[in-house]
Image (cartoon, coloured by chain):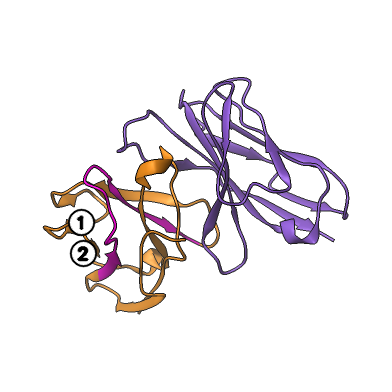
Amino acid sequence: NAGVTQTPKFRILKIGQSMTLQCTQDMNHNYMYWYRQDPGMGLKLIYYSVGAGITDKGEVPNGYNVSRSTTEDFPLRLELAAPSQTSVYFCASSYRTERNSPLHFGNGTRLTVT
Amino acid sequence: DAKTTQPPSMDCAEGRAANLPCNHSTISGNEYVYWYRQIHSQGPQYIIHGLKNNETNEMASLIITEDRKSSTLILPHATLRDTAVYYCIVRVANTGNQFYFGTGTSLTVIP
C-alpha cells in the first residue's frame, strides 16, 4: 500500500494564479481531510469529506474548494492564490465512522505564493 | 479554539522516560484521546489512542486519568529520533469526525 499520496511536493505560485493539490489514498478509507500548517503553528482543518459526493467545511475554508467524486481522490483547489495561502498542506484519511479510527497523513505539499 | 492544552516545549535526557502531559477537561464520554507526532515538518505520525483505560503499544504508553480530563503520553526510553512536536487531540463531539490539532509540545531529546 502506498497510503496517502500528495502531489506536487513543492509549488511556487504567483498571486492570482490557481492550482489543484492532488491527494489520493489506496486504503479504501471513506473519510478524507485537508489541513494547512503555517510555520511554527499547528494544523488547521480546511475541508473534510465523509464519503464520495459529500464534503464539508473545517476551520479555515475561505479561498479553497474541494470535490470528492471517488473514494480514492480528494483534490483541493485554490482559485485565486494569495500570499496568506503560503503554507504546507497535508491530506489525511481515516477508515470508518467509529470514533477510534486514527488519521493517516501524506507527506505534504509546500506552497509558496509570491 | 483548541480543545486540548499542552506545554509548548519540554526537554528529556536520552534514555530516560519522556512524560508529555495533556489537559482535555471538556472531553465527552465517548470521545477518544489521540496522540500524534510530527518530525521535521513531515506528515504527522499516529502514535496511540485510548478511551478510558491505559494503553500501550510498541511506541508508547498512554495514561488517562480516571475523570478523563487529562492524559500523559510516555515514551519509555527516549532516543534522539523522538525529537518532534507531539500533538494531543480529542474529537469534538458535535462535529462528527473532525480532528482539531492544537500547537502541540515540542520535545527535544538531549544526548
Per the image, label 2 sits on a secondary structure element best described as loop
Left or right: residue A27 versus residue B30 is right
| Quadrant (top left, top right, bottom left, bottom right) of the C terminus of chain B | bottom left
Above or below, comparing residue A66 to residue B72 in the picture: above
- The tag earlier along the polypeptide, 2 or 1, is 1
The chain coloured purple in the image? A
Residue B67: quarter of image: bottom left
Left or right: residue B34 versus residue A81 is left
**Most foreground residue, B94 or A18:** B94
- Residue corresponding to mark 1: B61
- Per the model, the C-alpha gap separating discs 2 and 1 is 8 Å
**Most foreground residue, B5 or B1:** B1
The chain carrying label 2 is B
* Chain B color in figure: orange
- Residue corresponding to mark 2: B76
Q: In front: mark 2 or mark 1?
A: 1
